[in-house]
Image (cartoon, grey):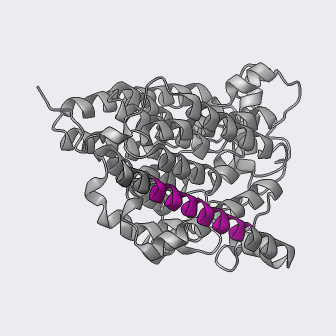
Amino acid sequence: MHDQTPLIRRPAEHQVDRGEWRLPVILFLTLFAVFGLTARTSGGSWDYYSANYASWHVVHDGDPWLDGGTVPGLQGDPEESTWVMHDAPNGHTVVKRFPGAIAIALPAYWIAQAGEMTVVPGAITAALACAFGILMLFLAMRTIMRESVALAACGLLALGTPIWTVAADAVWPHTVTVLGIGGMAWGAVRQRWWLVGLFGGVLLWGRLHAALIVAIFGVLLGWWRRSPRITLVVGSVSGSFLALVCLWTRWWTGSWNPLASYGSDVLSNAQTGWARLASEAQLFVSPDRGILVWSPLMVLLTPALIRGWKDIPDWARALLFGGLAYTLLQAWISRAVGGDSFYGYRHGIELVMAATPAYAMTTRHLGSTARQWVAPLMTLQVFAMAFGALFDPFLTAEQVWHDNAFYYFALREAWPVGPLMLVGIMCFVMIGLRILERRKGERASMEKALASHS
């Protein structure tokens, strides 16, 4: 019989009452409200509009075929073939999107029964899916760290990264992957490997090559825990979702090829040579698409991550490895810029989602100087994302190496109001933290004095 005990046991002080659901419910409702109130209701990218149109068309007409037409607004567009496939193997005209981005919004469009196309049901779906994905990640994280740390980390993930401005703003493939990664983490801490496989299947419906995250997660946990059963269960359950993708593409395009619904040439843009290195660099450090530019806290926390590596539970390490491998693969098979009409980065969302448990777990290894920068950087990230979520600015793909949307629109164009607001909010946060620290110190001194007199 194989040992399935986690490599890092759950500390006694982090045990959570199974009946305590008040905070998770508040977190979910708050995120859903914030995401929903700031989600797109019109305009935006053809990436998500075409997926939403396909969802609406299936509900409205009963099939996905746009024979004799196209997505409204794309008539005559030279880039129409990016989103629409004419003469699919079954002879029909169809939208070219990954199945998950279309399927996830079908219930909302069925409930809405809209006579004319609208992106609102899709926007509500995105808000709901991302709020639920982060809720499940929080439920997993609070079993390995203080609940307050897990809450702060998930709050920053939700409101301080492009999950807010992209994945929760409209139905992108990242909407589905956020849900899948959160569910995998939740299933892992419960040691429900079929649940890990189920949400891994959801993940690969968002992006087929996200199966790499599922594979690495299942293989590493099976290896580290000396339990092939884990790998087998995760692989078989998630593999059944791959079979469902094949069934979907057979219905959608007439082909059994799981890549057919996105176009069989999906790998034709793979980067080689210097182009590959440039794409990887763009993914991490380009001014308007760089993960480390928009999420500088990752840079600050990386030394602590290295120092505290042995403290990280195996499932969080496996998730981090999977997210990193997938993200590097994504930058190789496609340009890291990710297109236009969105704020922040797209192709780093899976990495920050997968890395959050590991980074949060090792914050106690931060040095004194680094600790002083945590609150300002968290404030900066949330302020930057809030600006994007409220005003929906964006730069074109040609500008991503030359400018940054937050700096361009919130600081330079809104001078001096934008910078003054940012400085004011940072000062407010720092003063609040100092007051809390002083009260905490006074309370500790009082308790020490009472203990000495007793």
Q: Position of residue 406 (x, y in %)?
A: 73, 69
Residue 432: in magenta span:
yes
Overall secondary structure of the magenta stretch?
Answer: helix
Residue furthest out toward the front = 453
Residue sitting at x 70%, y 50%: 81
218 part of magenta stretch: no
Place of residue 353 in the rendered image (x, y in percent of width and height, measured from the top left) = 50, 50
The structure residue drawn at horizontal position 74% and vertical position 68%, both measured from the top left corner, is 396
Residue 346 falls in image quadrant? bottom right
Q: Where 409 sits versus 447, above or below?
A: below
Q: Position of residue 147 (x, y in %)?
A: 47, 43
Of all residues, the one furthest to the right in this rendering is: 116
215 vs 186, nearest the viewer: 186
Count the numbered circles shown: 0
Task: Determine which quarter of the picture holds residue 427.
Answer: bottom right
Q: Is residue 173 above or below residue 432?
A: above
User: Which residue is the extreme one toward the left?
Assistant: 1
Q: Is residue 18 visible?
A: yes
Q: Residue at x 28, y 46 (%)?
A: 314
Res 70 → quadrant: top right
User: Which contiguous range is marked in magenta?
Assistant: 425-446
Where the N terminus falls, by quadrant? top left
